[in-house]
Amino acid sequence: MADSTADSTAANADALKREYEKLQAEIVSNGGGSKDRGETDDGSSGVLKAIDEANRITNCPRNVESKKPETDIPSSSSPSPMVNVPKEFKCPLSKKIMIEPVIVASGQTYEKRYITEWLKHERTCPKTKEVLSHSLLIPNHLVDDLITKWCLANKFERPKSSGAMVTELFTDGVDSLLQRISSPSSVEDQTQAAGELRSQTKKFASVRAFFVAEVPDSITRLLTPISAMDDAVHSNPELQEYLVTTLFNISIVEKNKKVIAENPLVIPLLTKTLKQGTAETRRNSAATLMSLSVIDSNKIIMGNAEVLKALIDLIEEGDVVATFEAASVVFKLCTVLENREKAISAGVTQVLINKIKGGSNWAVLLAVLALVSTHNRAIQVMDDLGFIHDLFSILRKPSCSVTGENAVVIVFNMWDKNRHSSGLKVIREEEYQYGTFTKLAKQGTDRAVRKAEAILQWLKRYGTR
């Protein structure tokens, strides 16, 4: 029985070979394109390449194994024997036998629905990496015919198109890009792969969603090339920027935040890139920390002195966007009491006051100062820098209700902590000359009204001092 099966398979293979050679001669005689089979002039070079690559295929039906199968496609006539599927019949993206093989401009053949999804966000050939001159998809009737005949010869039922959402493309694509990043063939290829990954995670929510959950060791593989921050990395700031931006993109997904923050590479790396790299890298490092800080447990992980110092330095040295992002992160971290004390020790009070004195009267800067103004050390710095006069200027013309609220909270805390006569004197003079706290008690937010009314009560009680 076994001999009979083998003879039948060999006969089928010979028949397939003859049919293939006939088809090949027909295509070549037509100048490389078979018009009656639906080929176009644009696809002719792809068909010729497919012919050249397919010379080995005709012998593949003989490769029948019953003990150590290499594929998961069983024969329809028997559940146990397994057949080696020729690699030319598998889509390079899905790794599955093709249902609608098409040729792209590079001459490579792919499953139509997978390459269609790829071309929505890329203009390169997934296999050769070359930029495609056009995005037309040419039906590869030669390969389609060969697959059909091969399935018949081996008694396989060819899969039908399900039209289902393709996630394997993204999984395989991301895994391939990570491989090029973590084990690059060249610096140029590594940087190109990092740029492609940044683009995918920026454009596609599906890529961001499964990046952590479905791609093994994705975060570690992403960050390993820049975690050392050695000379080679410093010489390629573009690579740093791409990888940090990718990390930010995937951190947007809620279910990724905890996993990212708990990876031992992440926080130390972001701390370093807050200090180094391009302006974009520093901004995106701060933005990533901001994204991660919405999880309470992450605030503890992130709230070490080194992180806070790097953020405070960025507030002082960065551009407008970087300063805002860094200050926002410090605010989130300082909602945890122990982080607040670390931030004060790292010099946050003076840096924020200097920014405000320099004209950066943003609500987030005052919000951080309102948090730290519950500590005597912060109040002392404010007194030494004469910050109360800046607060008065803000209160006279607050940019928004939140700004006014935080400013009056700080004034309240400054007096409540020290209660010295000089402090009361300047508050009394401000109220007498501008009616600042009376107006605030009528027009401010609920919290601002409470603080302003308390200050007015103090003036009434201690006004004669």
Image (spheres, grey):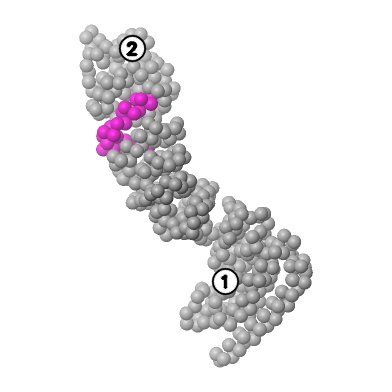
Q: Residues within 10 Å of mark 2 (few under 14, many from 20)?
A: some
- Magenta stretch in the rendered image: 328-356
For mark 2, what is the residue? Answer: 430
Q: Which mark is residue 87?
A: 1
Find out whether residue 108 is within the magenta segment.
Answer: no
265 vs 16: above or below: above
Find out whether residue 349 is within the magenta segment.
Answer: yes
104 vs 337: above or below: below
Most foreground residue, 443 or 342: 342
Q: Residue at x 38, y 17 (%)?
A: 393
From the image, state whether disc 1 or disc 2 is nearer to you: 1
* Secondary structure beneath label 1: helix
Q: Residue at x 70, y 64 (%)?
A: 45
Most foreground residue, 20 or 171: 20
368 vs 148: above or below: above
Quarter in which the N terminus is drawn:
bottom right
Q: CA distance from mark 1 to mark 2?
A: 83 Å
Q: Principal SS element in the magenta part?
A: helix
- Left or right side of 25 for 457: left
Indicate the position of residue 445 as horizontal and vertical percent values. Answer: 39, 23
Residue 215 shows in this picture: no
- Sequence-wise, the earlier of marks 1 and 2 is 1
* Secondary structure beneath label 2: helix
Q: Residue at x 74, y 75 (%)?
A: 25
Q: Residue at x 47, y 79 (%)?
A: 68
Q: Amino acid at mark 1?
A: Lys
Residue 98 shows in this picture: yes
Indicate the position of residue 426 as horizontal and vertical percent values. Answer: 29, 13
- Left or right side of 393 for 96: right
Most foreground residue, 457 or 320: 320
